[in-house]
């Protein structure tokens, strides 16, 4: 896995930083159009221009209040060549008979049982 950029530097983004670190991911920083501060290294319009897919993988920290934006950005950035790894917390359980899509975030103590199908870019809470 390449160094990770987290799209969104609010509280959800900071929680995903912890998830990434607990799954042995290296967080290079955050990309955010509204927040500034520690480790915010760019804006979303710099993804694919200054921040390139050959250098970074992405984690989506745009939450449920902006689901259309989240999915459109996910699709557009994948089409631009970025990879969204699925991050699974070490305490989560995924049945070998379940299917989890690209770019999913499976949080601590979540349980994905047999025959479950989780689509792309989903967040699974316990």
Image (cartoon, grey):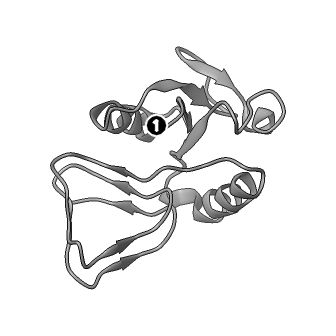
Q: Quadrant of the C terminus?
A: bottom left
Determine whether, in the image, residue 11 is placed left or right of residue 94.
right
Tally of numbered tags: 1
Residue drawn at the location 53% of the way across and 58% of the way down: 65
> Where 66 sits versus 87, above or below?
below
User: Residue reaching furthest top?
Assistant: 38
Q: Which of the pair 109/88 is nearer the observer? A: 88
User: Residue reaching furthest right?
Assistant: 49
Determine whether, in the image, residue 17 is placed left or right of residue 94.
right
> Where 46 sits versus 74, above or below?
above
Give the percent coordinates (x, y) of residue 76. 75, 57
Quadrant location of residue 36?
A: top right
Determine whether, in the image, residue 20 is placed left or right of residue 94.
right
> What residue did someone put label 1 on?
13
Quadrant location of residue 98?
A: bottom left
Residue drawn at the location 28% of the way across and 51% of the way down: 107
Residue drawn at the location 50% of the way across and 56% of the way down: 103
Residue drawn at the location 36% of the way across and 37% of the way down: 15
Give the percent coordinates (x, y) of residue 84. 55, 50
How many other residues sit within 10 Å of disc 1, few (<14), some (14-19) or many (≥20)?
many
Of helix, strand and loop, which one carries label 1? helix
Quadrant location of residue 48?
A: top right
Give the percent coordinates (x, y) of residue 116. 30, 81
Give the percent coordinates (x, y) of residue 119. 47, 73
User: Residue reaching furthest bottom?
Assistant: 115
């Amino acid at each position: 896995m390449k160094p990770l950029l987290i799209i969104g530097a609010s509280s959800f983004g900071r929680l995903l930083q912890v998830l990434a670190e607990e799954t042995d991911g290296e967080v290079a920083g955050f990309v955010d159009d509204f927040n500034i501060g520690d480790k915010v290294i760019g804006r979303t319009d710099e993804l694919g221009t200054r921040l390139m897919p050959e250098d970074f993988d992405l984690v989506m920290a745009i939450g449920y209040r902006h689901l259309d934006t989240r999915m459109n950005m996910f699709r557009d950035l994948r089409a631009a060549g970025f990879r969204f790894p699925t991050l699974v917390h070490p305490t989560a359980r995924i049945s070998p008979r379940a299917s989890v899509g690209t770019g999913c975030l499976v949080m601590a103590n979540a349980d994905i049982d047999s025959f479950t199908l989780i689509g792309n870019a989903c967040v699974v809470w316990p």
